[in-house]
Image (tube, rainbow, N blue to C red):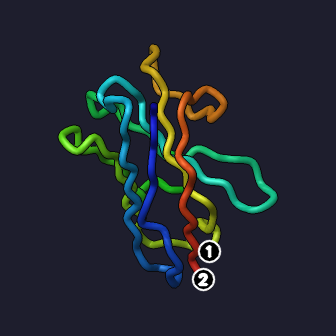
Amino acid sequence: QVQLVESGGGLVQAGASLRLSCAASGLTITNYDMGWFRQAPGKEREFVAAIRWIDIQQAADSVKGRFTISRDNAKNAVYLQMDSLKPEDTAVYYCAARGIRSRITPDWHLYDYWGQGTQVTASS
């Protein structure tokens, strides 16, 4: 049974940092593209960043230069370092996994497995 468990969310002031973690079980992350998505109230789920086993990365323009995705293969975990948080970053953040295809996709509909989400709130 595949499980993705996020942690590390919280309430911070704008400009602060948070580090999200995603612990995977039931799959080996080196066989998957691992992504982070977020969903704010009343909005559609949106792509944040993704990483492939050979360190190919992709990030949304809105977070480039502020957020960094990384992984630890030995721990079977993926991380999202979020710096200089803004109020517009407030959302539930989800970890997701997709079996490797030709290239990383930002389309959340195409991901196979999802975590339960963790709330991130950046107050102004």
View extreme (top): residue? 102
Q: Is residue 58 visible?
A: no
View extreme (left): residue? 74
Tell me the quarter of the picture where residue 51 sits: top left
> Which residue corresponds to mark 2?
123
Q: Secondary structure at mark 1?
A: helix
Q: CA distance from mark 1 to mark 2?
A: 6 Å
Q: How many marks?
A: 2
Residue 75 in the figure: left or right of residue 62 = left
Q: Looking at the image, which is closer to me, 97 or 80? A: 97
Q: Position of residue 74 (x, y in %)?
A: 18, 40
Q: Position of residue 50 (x, y in %)?
A: 44, 39
Q: Looking at the image, which is closer to me, 42 or 88? A: 42
Structural crowding at the residue carrying mark 2, measured as other residues with C-alpha within 10 Å and reported as few (<14), some (14–19) or many (≥20): some
Residue occupying image coordinates x 34% and y 23%: 31
Q: Secondary structure at mark 2?
A: strand
Relative to 118, is 57 above or below?
above
In the rendered image, the quadrant that contains the C terminus is bottom right
User: Looking at the image, is mark 1 or mark 2 earlier in the sequence?
Assistant: 1
The amino acid pointed to by label 2 is: Ser
Residue occupying image coordinates x 56% and y 77%: 122
Q: Is residue 101 visible?
A: yes
Residue occupying image coordinates x 49% and y 27%: 98
In the rendered image, the quadrant that contains the N terminus is top left
View extreme (right): residue? 42
The amino acid pointed to by label 1 is: Pro
> Which residue corresponds to mark 1?
87
Structural crowding at the residue carrying mark 1, measured as other residues with C-alpha within 10 Å and reported as few (<14), some (14–19) or many (≥20): some
Residue occupying image coordinates x 61% and y 26%: 110
Q: Are marks 1 and 2 in contact (CB under 8 Å)?
A: yes
Q: Position of residue 58 (x, y in %)?
A: 44, 38
